[in-house]
Amino acid sequence: MRRSFLFVTVFGVLLLAGVLPASARKAQYIRPIVKTLPADGLTQVVIQNLVGPISIQTQDTPTVKVEVLIHGGGLDETFARTLTQQLDFQIQAFGPQLRIIGNYPLDHFRNFGYPYMKSIMFIHGTDTNEYQGKTVHIRAVDSKKAVELWAEIRVTIPNSMGVVIRNTYGDVTVHGSGTASNGLFDGFSDVGDFEIDNPRWSQIKVQSDYGKVSFMRGFGAAQDIHVNTSFGGAYFYLQPGATGKIMADKDLGFLHNNFTDSHFTTENGSHVMVLGDGHGTVVHVDMSVGSLHLERAAG
């Protein structure tokens, strides 16, 4: 009861004052949520978050481990701690689907400060978005209009599970190990980079409106890949002997090939490069403003 009274009182003062002044932010607090569930019967994990990075690790494991670090900042540690309590994460199985959903205090706040804002061509992406049916703004952490409240999500899953990510603002990293699967990875971040290392799914769909997409050591087990960016390039770091086909469409940007002596050709309006004998991963790249980079993976 005392905590609730403190929350209402402090927030009321802040709302009357026009939200927390940047110069007054003195303290940060991190509230962890850790949950491990059996993977039996689960085929897909769905993650929805407003702001913060997401990390996915796949491996040969019989469980799903979820770690959420909720970050809050404020006048002092008491305020920051109270603020983190207002962000709730629903971690629950619905049939074969495990849902990890961030429920932000949108009735109190619509402006959220994030310390890792991006700048692409001097643009910080968009700070106006819709989350759970309400208009929200992601701003620099020192904005006078915003409260600092965001979440870092780390999930470890079996290789057999598919993944769906819907993130408004934040980077997504993927690290795979173990056996391959026939699953699907479907990731979207309105503002954020994707960094993918040794994916174990056969199908991958990645979209970022403001951010780059990188495959760090080839395409792993993927056979069909779709990459879509509005402002941001695609970086493919390939291993010697890589085979397959890359089909790229772009409006403004370049095609850089530092991997082979092959060249892009034009087929039906798309830029096409055949790797090796052409049998292998097929990659579709659609960029509005951005360049494609083919590079040799680090040894």
Image (cartoon, rainbow, N blue to C red):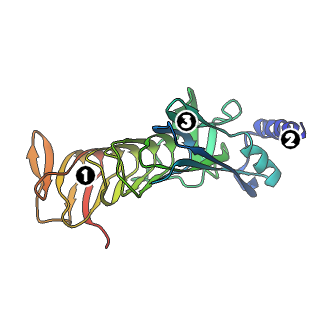
- The front one of 221 and 178 is 178
Residue type at the position of mark 1: Gly
Q: Can you identify the residue that label 3 sits on?
A: 99
As measured in the structure, the alpha-carbon distance from the residue carrying label 3 to the one carrying label 1 is 37 Å
Q: Measured from the top left, where is residue 197 in percent x and y?
A: 38, 58
Q: Measured from the top left, where is residue 253 in percent x and y?
A: 25, 52
1 or 2: tag closer to the N-terminus: 2
Q: Can you identify the residue that label 1 sits on?
A: 253
- The front one of 59 and 237 is 59
**Circle 3: is it few (<14), some (14-19), or many (20+) Cα within 10 Å?**
some
Callout in the foreground (1, 2) = 2
Residue at screen point 9% across, 46% down: 266
**Marks 1 and 2 in Cβ contact (< 8 Å):** no
Say the numbered circle drawn on residue 3. 2
Residue type at the position of mark 2: Arg
2 or 3: tag closer to the N-terminus: 2
SS under mark 3: strand
> Is residue 268 something that shows in the picture?
yes
> Is residue 76 something that shows in the picture?
no
> On the rendered image, what quadrant is the C terminus found in?
bottom left
Rendered image quadrant of residue 109:
top right
- The front one of 41 and 25 is 41
As measured in the structure, the alpha-carbon distance from the residue carrying label 1 to the one carrying label 2 is 53 Å
Rendered image quadrant of residue 83:
top right
